[in-house]
Image (tube, rainbow, N blue to C red):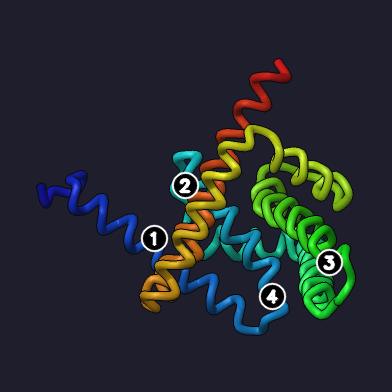
Amino acid sequence: MFKVDGLVHLVCTWIYRFAYLNLLFLVSCLPIITIFPATVSLFGVVRQWIKKNDPPVFTTYKLLFVENFKQSMIIGPAITGLFLLIFADFYLISRMQIGMKDILFITLVIISFFLFISVLYISPLMVNGYYSSKQLVKSSFQFAIYKPLLTITNALALIGFVIIALRFSFFLVFFFFSISAFITYWFSEKKFIHATLTEK
């Protein structure tokens, strides 16, 4: 069981990979503004793992960081701005005293939901092929509503990971982001493959 290709070795290898990638991501996010290219790089590395490749993690991460820096710095702040706008709208609605308050609240919840599930596919699409910023936004929404069961399962898994991370801080530091990216890209890959087969 302890041989090189044994189960224990395999488990330890994957624990090391996820922990190393998670720490690399957190360190590269320290300047705050680099969160966006760091996220794309994170997805780029896990994409290679899901594709059964085993590239050098640091070199691959660094290369993807540089390659996607410009586009991610356009898309990332735009998405952040949208979420901030939605939060501001929720605050304003909560202070309203008009009869349409409930309708406005439900409408904003629906908009927030579709924005959230669309954001799940921004980084996977960015590392899966070349898209202009406009194509990226459009495609992320299309993939979010395509095969919705996969999207909902992915979202529930992420919510579960958030709950675990809030309770166990070590999970946040060593595994949360890398495992979440791996799971999200795994679901994305299922959609990419199915969409390709459908087009043929």
Is the C-beta separation of discs 3 and 1 under 8 Å?
A: no
Q: Which of pointers 3 and 4 lies earlier in the amino acid sequence?
A: 4
**Outermost bottom residue:** 31
Q: Foreground residue, 121 or 131?
A: 121
How many angstroms separate mark 1 from mark 2 (CA)? Answer: 10 Å
Q: Is mark 4 on a helix, strand or loop?
A: loop
Which residue is tagged 2?
49
Q: Nearer the viewer, mark 2 or mark 3?
A: 3
Q: Nearer the viewer, mark 3 or mark 4?
A: 3
Q: How crowded is mark 1: few (under 14 residues within 10 Å), some or many (20 or more)?
A: some
Is the C-beta separation of discs 3 and 4 under 8 Å?
A: no
Question: Would residue 74 appear left or right of 175 to someone viewing this image?
Answer: right
Q: Nearer the viewer, mark 3 or mark 1?
A: 3
How many angstroms separate mark 3 from mark 1 (CA)? Answer: 48 Å
Q: Which of pointers 1 and 2 lies earlier in the amino acid sequence?
A: 1
Name the residue type under label 4. Thr
Numbered label tally: 4
Q: Which of pointers 2 and 4 lies earlier in the amino acid sequence?
A: 4
Q: Where is residue 148 in the image (x, y as percent from the top left)?
A: 63, 37
Q: What element carries label 3?
A: helix
Name the residue type under label 3. Lys
**Outermost left residue:** 1
In the rendered structure, find residue 98 and report the number of the disc placed on it.
Answer: none
Q: Foreground residue, 150 or 195?
A: 150
- Residue plotted at (83% across, 66% down): 101
In the rendered structure, find residue 17 and report the number of the disc placed on it.
Answer: 1
Q: Is mark 2 on a helix, strand or loop?
A: helix
Name the residue type under label 2. Trp
Which residue is tagged 3?
101
Eyeballing the image, is 43 above or below 36?
Answer: above
Q: How crowded is mark 4: few (under 14 residues within 10 Å), some or many (20 or more)?
A: some
